Image (cartoon, rainbow, N blue to C red):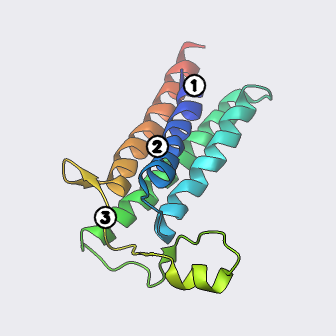
Amino acid sequence: MAQHLALGVPALLLGGAYLAQYGFGLYPCEMCWWQRYPHFVALGLAGLSFVAPPRNLWVALAGFSVFVSGLIGGFHAGVEYDWWEGITGCASAVAVTDDPLAAIMSAPLVRCDSAPWDLLGISLAGWNFLISCGAGIAIWVLLRRGAKTA
């Protein structure tokens, strides 16, 4: 079960992030990208656990990576809610055109300290914090329980 959770959670969260980006125009800021990187790592580690021993080590590392993404999401949510100051740089989406300079100059600025969307008052970064930290802990608990019964 932990193995499937370690693969499924980052896959679903990345899928949701890309759906928000390309389906609904919610382009990621710099800190949004930071949250995605550990999920990519978790996908690779969880995938590796299906084909290479020691399976539990790869799953545990994937769980850690999911948890790290959640911590980054928590930091980002705190910046969005003005609990603390974040980074100064922001990202922007640039379309591919014949005139790259014009595309850069007309690209929308995506601010890290402003949540473009929320559900029940919780931003996407906040949801990533809740889901990823919860999933990371659940993966470790499931691994621990499996080790005790083995």
Residue type pointed to by label 2: Gly
CA separation in Å, label 3 and label 1: 31 Å
CA separation in Å, label 3 and label 2: 16 Å
Residue type pointed to by label 3: Ala
The residue tagged 1 is 4
Q: Answer with mark 2 or mark 1, whichever residue precedes in sequence.
A: 1
Q: Residue furthest left?
A: 120
- x, y percentage for residue 72? 45, 61
Instruction: State which quadrant residue 101 falls in.
Output: bottom right
Label 3 element class: loop
Label 2 element class: helix
Q: Residue at x 47, y 67 (%)?
A: 31
Q: Is 149 or 104 nearer to us in this picture?
A: 104
Q: Residues within 10 Å of mark 1 (few under 14, many from 20)?
A: some
Of circles 2 and 1, the one toward us is 2
Q: Residue at x 38, y 51 (%)?
A: 129
Label annotation for residue 132: none
Residue type pointed to by label 1: His
The residue tagged 2 is 16
Quarter of the figure that contains the N terminus:
top right
> Measured along the vertical axis of the image, is residue 123 above or below residue 30?
above
Q: Residue at x 48, y 45 (%)?
A: 19
Q: Is 91 or 8 nearer to us in this picture?
A: 91
CA separation in Å, label 2 and label 1: 18 Å
Quarter of the figure that contains the C terminus:
top right
Label annotation for residue 115: 3
Q: Residue at x 52, y 49 (%)?
A: 18
- x, y percentage for residue 85? 33, 80
Q: Answer with mark 3 or mark 1, whichever residue precedes in sequence.
A: 1
Label 1 element class: helix
